[in-house]
Amino acid sequence: MDPAGLRPLGVGEVLDVAIKIYRARFPVLVKSVAVVLGPVFALSAIVRISIPVRDDFFDAGQPGTWTEFDGDQLWAFFAGTVVIALLGFLASQLATGACFKSVSGAYLDEQPDWRGSLRFARSKLGALLWLSFLLVILLVPAFLACLVPGVYLYVAWSVASPVLLLEDVRGWAALKRSRQLVKGRFWPTVAVLVLIAVLSGIVQAVFLGIFAALVSVSGNEVAQAIAEAVGQTASSALTTPLSAAVLTVLYFDLRVRKEGFDLELLARRLGVEPGTATGAEILPPAASREVTDSDDQPPFWPPPPGWRPRDG
């Protein structure tokens, strides 16, 4: 398959392509997230309703005496919170992996299927959990020691998940591979990550604010818990696929810039039959350029006949 439609993208073009894929596969992406995250948020609402945290959760004793509290209720709340946190983490990994699979399928003309995407993500769940564990134990000390190393490593490892899912490179090797791809494109990668973080934050704030405002006047704890669960599900269903789309397009762009991106190889690793699409239909049109021998980067990939990189 000829991947001539793939070419290096600017920061704005990465977002443009990601949003196009996001819109084209919106139903599939939303289902992939809502199916796994919705039940977790619903369970969180049930715990909140069953064991509400009130102002009198801790009953203060008389001055000079030990503070008394309802131990059974306290431990039940903590146990429920821990279980929900673990389930939420597992569900988020599964949903994100499914979104990566669905977005990557746009480059292969693969028919979207949220069930198939979730099955693919489930087969990689163990590797995703291990990668997340490595990121936590490596990034947290880096941020605590000094902000600069933490930021650098976060950006350098930003496409580790697409590497794991699309190249089947796992653990520490996925982190090294991500750093290799980002090398030389650090600041454009920072710009992409900042833009998607701001956009996702705005969407989450709007949805949570709307649902909170709808029930705030009633003061009903049950209604508030339900509204919070619905708002979290809706915001996650919108922002998780968008972040995954941006990271996937960013990953492809880095590969196009540094390597001859091979769609057939990607198709075999994903276990699908590649279609006839080359990805050109989702890319913004390339600017018309005269091919010379003085360009640092080719105008598109593969380079046109006669193109040579500028001598250093």
Image (spheres, grey):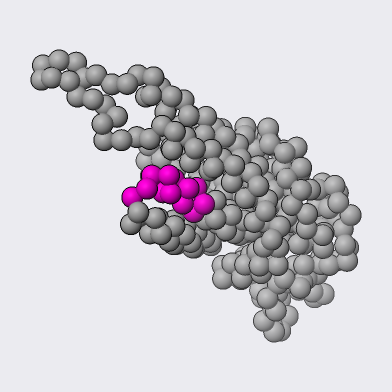
> Residue 1 lies in magenta, yes or no?
no
* Residue 295 spot, x, y in % from top left: 66, 74
Q: Does residue 62 appear in this view?
A: yes
Q: Does residue 145 appear in this view?
A: no
Which residue is drawn at the image coordinates 28% and 21% (left, top)?
69
Question: What secondary structure is the stretch in magenta mostly built from?
Answer: helix
> Residue 229 lies in magenta, yes or no?
yes
Q: Where are the magenta residues, as a range?
A: 219-232
Vertically, is 16 above or below 61?
Answer: below
Taking 26 as reference, is 135 left or right? left
Which residue is drawn at the image coordinates 32% and 21% (left, top)?
70
* Residue 115 spot, x, y in % from top left: 76, 48
* Residue 139 spot, x, y in % from top left: 48, 38
* Residue 227 spot, x, y in % from top left: 46, 51
Q: Nearer the viewer, residue 64 or 304?
A: 64
Name the image quarter holding residue 57. top left
Q: Nearer the viewer, residue 239 or 115?
A: 115
